[in-house]
Image (cartoon, grey):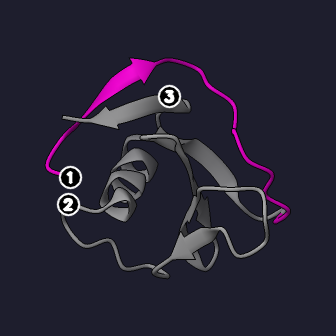
Amino acid sequence: MSTASIASRNVSPTFQHDCDCCRFLGSLDGADLYVCKDGYVRRFGNDGPEYGSLGNLAPAGTPYALAAKLVKLGRAPHAYRTR
């Protein structure tokens, strides 16, 4: 993923996420993005193991890099798609 554009504005999470500490940031290509005290989370399904996390790592070109950027910008949750 090199860049992302807004697909729709002011979205809600698609998948269930049971951590009260996480804050929903938006979605990227259908996966929900969150920030939590333990880092960035990407949820792509409702089942418990259907998520990914790299802690506070946010390598360039990954969904976690977008999550880090959204936290820094403080934007409302939007849906994004890769270009």
Q: Are marks 2 and 3 in contact (CB under 8 Å)?
A: no
What is the distance, in whole Å, between disc 2 and disc 3 at their CAs?
Answer: 18 Å
- The residue that mark 1 highlights is 1
Residue that sits furthest to the left in the current view: 2
Query: Where does the image place residue 31, in percent across and percent down from the top left?
Result: 53, 48
Q: Are marks 1 and 2 in contact (CB under 8 Å)?
A: yes
Q: Is residue 10 magenta?
A: yes
Q: Residues within 10 Å of mark 1 (few under 14, many from 20)?
A: few
Is 80 left or right of 25, judged from the image as shown? left
Mark toward the viewer: 3 or 1: 1
- The residue that mark 2 highlights is 61
Residue flagged by tag 2: what amino acid is it? Gly
Query: Where does the image place residue 1, in percent across and percent down from the top left?
Result: 20, 52
Instruction: Count numbered badges in the picture.
Output: 3
Q: Is residue 2 magenta?
A: yes
Report the magenta residues as a range.
1-19
Residue flagged by tag 3: what amino acid is it? His
User: Which callout, 2 or 3, points at the residue further toward the start of the chain?
Assistant: 2
Is 7 left or right of 53, judged from the image as shown? left
What is the distance, in whole Å, between disc 1 and disc 2 at their CAs?
Answer: 5 Å
Query: Where does the image place residue 68, in percent across and percent down from the top left?
Result: 38, 58
